[in-house]
Structure formats: C-alpha cells, structure tokens
Image: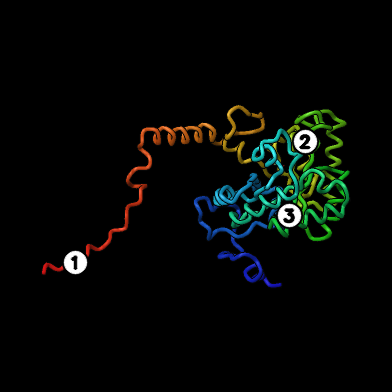
Amino acid sequence: MSDNSEVKYGRPSATTGTSNLGEAVGGADTARRPVTVPEIRARKGGMPLTMVTAYDATFARMLDDAGIEMLLVGDSLGMVVQGNPDTLGVGVDDIVYHCKAVARGNRWAHVVGDMPFLSYQVTPEEAVRNAGRILAEGRAHAVKLEGGAAMAATIRRIVDVGIPVMAHVGLTPQSVHALGGFRVQGRDDAAAQRILADAHAVTDAGAYALVLEGIPGELAARITEEVSIPTIGIGAGVHCDGQVLVCYDLLGMTADLRPKFVKRYDEGHTRVVGAAQAFRDEVRRREFPGPEHTFGMRKRPVPVTGTG
Ligand code: KIV
C-alpha cells in the first residue's frame, strides 16, 4: 500500500505525513490527522502522551479540540456518570452506548473503550465477542482491560483477531473488594515484583500500551524502562510515557473528593454551581430571558385598503 493509503481508506486528512503531536490547540485542524496504534507505540520514550476519559460527544469534541491524543470511555462512568460507589455495575451495553457518543463527537483522537467487569474474565471467547462489539458497534479503536499475567492469554486472543488491547495493572478498580479498597499497590518488594511481572506478561501477550494505576513512582519508572510499550500513568508518577486523568477530576467537578494523584486544572464544581445560581437568580428577578433571547411575531404586511 502506498503512503497515500490513509487518504483513500482513512478519515480525511489534509496533512498526511505531518506532525500529530497535538499542536492543534485552538482548532488548527490542518496540523492533525487521526492518532493510530502505531503512532502511540512510536511515542515510547518520546513526547509524553495524554489520555482523558470522555463519556459523551460534547466532551469528546472539546478534549479532541484540545489536542488530547486518546479518549478513554472508562468504566469510571459507573461512578462519575451513573453515581455508583465503584465500577462493577457497568455493562458492555453501557460502554457501547457511551463509545458511540464519544465517536460521534471526536475527530482525531484515538478512542479506547473499557471492557467492563465480567465482560472478559469468564472465557476468552466472550472476551473476543465483547471487545468486538465495542469496536463494531461503539466505533472505538481499541479496548482496555484490567489484569496482568492472569489475563495474558485473553489479551493474546483479542489481539490475534485484530483488536488492539491496552492493558491496565497496579490498582485495578474492578478488583476493589479483593484489594480491600482503592489502595496504592506495589509498595513492598514482593508486590512490586508481581506488578513488574504483570507488566511484562501483558506486553509479551501483545498489548500496545499499558495503564499503570496507583503504584509508587519508582516502580512505574522501572516498568516504563523495562517494557517496550508506552506506559500511561494515573497515580504513578512522572516517569511514565504518558498520563491519564478522569475528565471530571481534571476539571474539578467534585466538591469534596480530592485524591492526592489528581491535579484540578479548573474548579468546575464552583463554576457550574455559580452559573446555575446566576441562572436561578436572573429567572427569579425576571431578568432572563431578555428581549435579545425572545422571539417576536412575524411582521405581516399591512393590507392596502381602498378609500372609495
Ligand atoms: O475507567 C477509567 O476511567 C480508567 C482510568 C482511571 C484509567 O480505567
């Protein structure tokens, strides 16, 4: 296939062969083309990658406009969208539904659909079928699943049918009850060795990238140095090949939840509450809607009437 294949078969690209490092801040689309799995792999050790969760079309478009390279339709939606205390109640239908919305809003970013609890752990056949649905119906470009050595054979099966898999080790939220809560993992030598072995196992199984969640920075740095695929950290220090945050955390949408690993880049909760209060107050004072927000009657031509 020639270098022009992307123009023929991919999404429209004005700039085949140019940089895709997210310089398009402010919407300079001429500098952008779709972010692909090979490109993500090639960023190992290079300019750090960014991934943010998205659950709907509007947020997907804003994050894509910001030059975020990867949008994760995370099963964190069970907590931040559905209001549950953990991610365990999310189903494949939920992920497919939210992936569809994100895919419609997105233009350039790489969309990853999370495989929910029990959608891949029962049999590899079910795992392949569910991963396939997330791509075929949800229009995601890849799936993510939690687990290390125990999931290696499943990852291999999914990868073998042509579905890219992002792995996820360390604090794996679907195991919240086994872990005794959302706790940092790998703090002692034996646990760190197990996570290191998990990272190697998923890499050998064919994963194209690896989320490292809730582990000491030194351990994440060592894994990043040893594995050949990009590591994407969350609560794993600065030495990963990229970073991921839940969009509601990044935007400061919660009043009281302030985990150590999150940096709030805005105070969304204060701003949204403030905006809603301003609306409420203006409505009560009959200041909104003003004339500029109000439709008038269509002006009818005045009928010409004869005088006699
Ligand atoms: O579901 C999710 O949002 C995640 C990220 C926190 C990595 O898995």
Question: Label 1's element?
Answer: loop
Which residue matches tag 1? 304
Residue extending farthest to the left is 308
Q: Which residue is mark 2?
A: 171
Of labels 3 and 1, earlier in sequence is 3
Q: Residue at x 37, y 42 (%)?
A: 289
Q: Nearer the viewer, residue 271 or 109?
A: 271
Q: Earlier in the sequence, mark 2 or mark 1?
A: 2
Q: Which residue is mark 3?
A: 134
In the picture, measured across the screen, residue 150 lies left or right of residue 146, that is right
> Which numbered dot is residue 167?
none
Spatial CA span between label 3 and label 1: 65 Å
- List x then y, in percent, for residue 163: 78, 57
| Separation (CA) of disc 2 from disc 3 | 23 Å
Q: Of discs 3 and 1, which sits in the foreground?
A: 1
Residue found at x 82% / y 45%? 118
Residue 225: x and y in percent read: 77, 43
Mark 2–mark 3 CB contact (< 8 Å): no
Disc nearest the viewer among 2 and 3? 3
The residue type indicated by label 3 comes to Ile
Quadrant of the image occupied by residue 157? bottom right
Count of marks, rendered view:
3
Badge 1 local density, few (<14 within 10 Å), some, or many (20+)?
few
Crowd rating for badge 3 (residues with CA inside 10 Å; few <14, some 14–19, many 20+): many
